[in-house]
Image: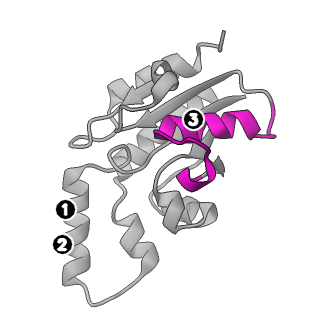
Amino acid sequence: MKVLFLDIDGVLNNYDTLRKSFEERRSSSEKSALKDWTSMLDTDMVKRLNVIVEKTECLVVLSSSWRLGNSRSMVELFLRARGFEGSLLSQTPSGDKVLNRKCRGDEIQAWLSTQRYGEVSSFCILDDIPNMGHLSDRLVLTDPKVGLTDDNVSSVISILSSPLS
């Protein structure tokens, strides 16, 4: 099984997306959680995520802080509203549930060590935060000013195509 650990902020959006979302929400009298959250997702970046899922047949595990204020099914609903064609298999445990947590990589390692979905043949971390500890060699780092690019997509596909040793 191939697994993609997905962050959202700085990956499926960028500074411009977030600025537009904030302005849109500030000027609107309509309050909708679905609209508020989906407005923070860039459709083109979600399409790039779809390319990764389609080409690698990977399963997606949510590692984003979005998992802390929303259920996995809600985040999947937000993603689907912007065109996501995959599904979220699971999410990493939050920091308070991970012993000696020093970085997001520790949460990902905790998921890898305790998951019950099957043998992980390869994994990649897609994030805009570089501190992944001993898992840094499986990280594709995005620029939060830009978000997910075609070059990032190629790098993710390459890592997911490389089995763990």
Q: Residues within 10 Å of mark 2 (few under 14, many from 20)?
A: few
Quadrant (top left, top right, bottom left, bottom right) of the N terminus: top right
**For the residues bearing labels 3 and 1, Cβ distance under 8 angstroms:** no
Residue for point 26% across, 67% down: 21
Assign a secondary structure to mark 2: helix
Q: Which mark is residue 4?
A: 3
Residue extent of the magenta highlight: 94-118
Assign a secondary structure to mark 3: strand
**For the residues bearing labels 3 and 2, Cβ distance under 8 angstroms:** no
Q: Residues within 10 Å of mark 1 (few under 14, many from 20)?
A: few
Q: Position of residue 126 (x, y in %)?
A: 45, 35
Q: Quadrant of residue 5?
A: top right
Q: Which mark is residue 19?
A: 1
Tell me how far mark 3 sits from mark 1, CA to CA: 27 Å
Q: Position of residue 47 (x, y in %)?
A: 43, 44
Amino acid type, residue under disc 2 in the picture: Glu
Q: Which mark is residue 44?
A: none
Q: Is residue 111 magenta?
A: yes
Residue for point 50% across, 68% down: 69
Question: Is tag 3's residue or tag 1's residue first in the polypeptide sequence?
Answer: 3
